[in-house]
Image (cartoon, rainbow, N blue to C red):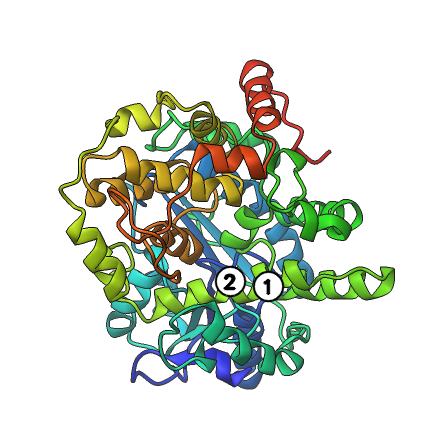
Amino acid sequence: MQERVRKLNDAPERPGGRWVLYWSQMNRRAEANHALAFAAELANRSDRPLLVYEGLTCSYPYANDRLHTFILEGVPETARRLAELGAGYIFYLRRRHSDPDDILYRLAAEASAVVTDDYPTFVARRYNASVPAKIGVAYYVVDSSCVVPMNRHPRREYAAYTIRPKIRKALAECLVPAPEVRLRRRWSLPLPAFHTEVEAGAIPALVASCEIDHGVRPSTAFRGGRAEALKRLEHFLETNLGHYGRLRNEPAANATSRLSPYLHFGQISSLEVALAASGYGRAHGLSAEEFLEELIVRRELAFNFARYTDDYQSLAVLPDWARRTLERHAGDRRDPVYSREQFEQAATHDELWNAAQKELLLRGVIHGYYRMYWGKKIIEWSPTHGEALATMIYLHDRYALDGRDPNTYTNILWCFGLHDRPWAERPVFGTVRYMSLEGMRRKTNVAAYVRQIELLERTGLDPLRIQ
């Protein structure tokens, strides 16, 4: 546990504190959560109750109905489970920009210590850099996002082949369940007036009451919450694990786990997914290796990149060979050239690209294999490499349920050469890997995927929705 923990300020624990506070920023779950377990350990050690605070504000970048709905759908379940554990739980929905924005500081003022999630992107990274110096009490961050703790890797890794042996060496030690949470003192204090009760039937009205972007509708495929994540995991293991290696790069087959939204919002952990896949594979004579490669090695390479990169949204962080070749081809002619609005509206000449963009607009995800093609074509059809990068980030930040994530930024920059190698030289890309529609047609059933997305767009009936 200790290698997952960092203390980010010099303030001591407060002797007179009324509770230990766990600020659930990214790992929004009561199970398989090392940060929650560490906070419980502090609470038991000091004979105090544990209070969990989860907030949802109207002011985060690209706040919209899709993201709000998905988060809120997980709240009733979290409240129930934390009550069973004996922890207090405050959920604060900041609906309007004029509403108070200091709830964390109010709760921390009466806490003996604050524990939160160690996460290297989006608002959690920003808050963990700015809050510890202001809070006046011990502030701990705990990595509960990775199977092998980020602290095991003291520097940025160059590519999957450099981090893979280090991860594999550590797996026997790290691939064990997270500590169970047991509390000595149950929460018995009244909840403050700013606490927001969330019931499933009231979520649409709560979302409508918020000053957010109401132009991005909830996903056609994904409902938020831990129960949904567990159902999706069970479906994947029983239906698709056996042929994941063969069909994972065939988007029309719908053979991947589609757990990325739940991993991003912390409603399920990569550790428990890895344990479940490993156990199911052993019990049924199936190999989980290719799935675990994506879930652990590739995902944790992305966390490593984001952790040790100051500006993980910049072409300046690319390897030298990629930056140089893109600079040499910066002035190359592009034909056609599309605006951000045309990309956003899926209004290109390419039916596969348009289908992938429509999947993002409707579901809030793009299948990983076609997302690579999607990104490569934005590079090819944008006025500059910098504009291509900005467009990809904007579309993910606004529409993707798995956006604003280490995987997001790493996969986007992979399109520009990150964690890759030089290929044959060509216009616009230089020696950065190129992908063509002809190649997609040879390797995948493009027509079947396009038909699926057309049917989804026309009917709203989504085969990815788990009943």
Image vertical order of residue 385 relative to residue 399, above or below: below
Q: Secondary structure at mark 2?
A: helix
User: Residue under circle 2?
Assistant: 298
Label 2, label 1: how many angstroms apart (C-alpha)? 6 Å
Image coordinates of residue 311 in percent, x first then y, are 24, 61
Query: Which tag, 2 or 1, sits closer to the chain's start?
Result: 1
In the displayed structure image, the side of residue 168 where residue 56 appears, left or right: left
Image vertical order of residue 137 relative to residue 332, above or below: below
Q: Secondary structure at mark 1?
A: helix
Comparing 362 with 56, the one in front is: 362
Comparing 39 with 119, the one in front is: 119
Residue at horizontal 41%, vertical 80%? 6
Q: Is residue 22 visible from the viewing direction of this image? A: yes
Q: Residues within 10 Å of mark 1 (few under 14, many from 20)?
A: some
Image coordinates of residue 339 in percent, x first then y, are 23, 27
Is the N terminus in the top left, top right, bottom left or bottom right quadrant? bottom right
| Amino acid of disc 2 | Arg
Comparing 458 with 112, the one in front is: 458
Quarter of the figure with residue 198: top right
Image coordinates of residue 93 in percent, x first then y, are 42, 43
| Pointer 2 with pointer 1, Cβ within 8 A | yes
Q: Is residue 365 visible from the viewing direction of this image? A: no
Is the C terminus in the top left, top right, bottom left or bottom right quadrant? top right
In the displayed structure image, the side of residue 408 where residue 251 appears, left or right: right
Residue at horizontal 42%, vertical 42%? 435
User: Residue under circle 1?
Assistant: 293
Image vertical order of residue 72 relative to residue 420, above or below: above
| Amino acid of disc 1 | Glu
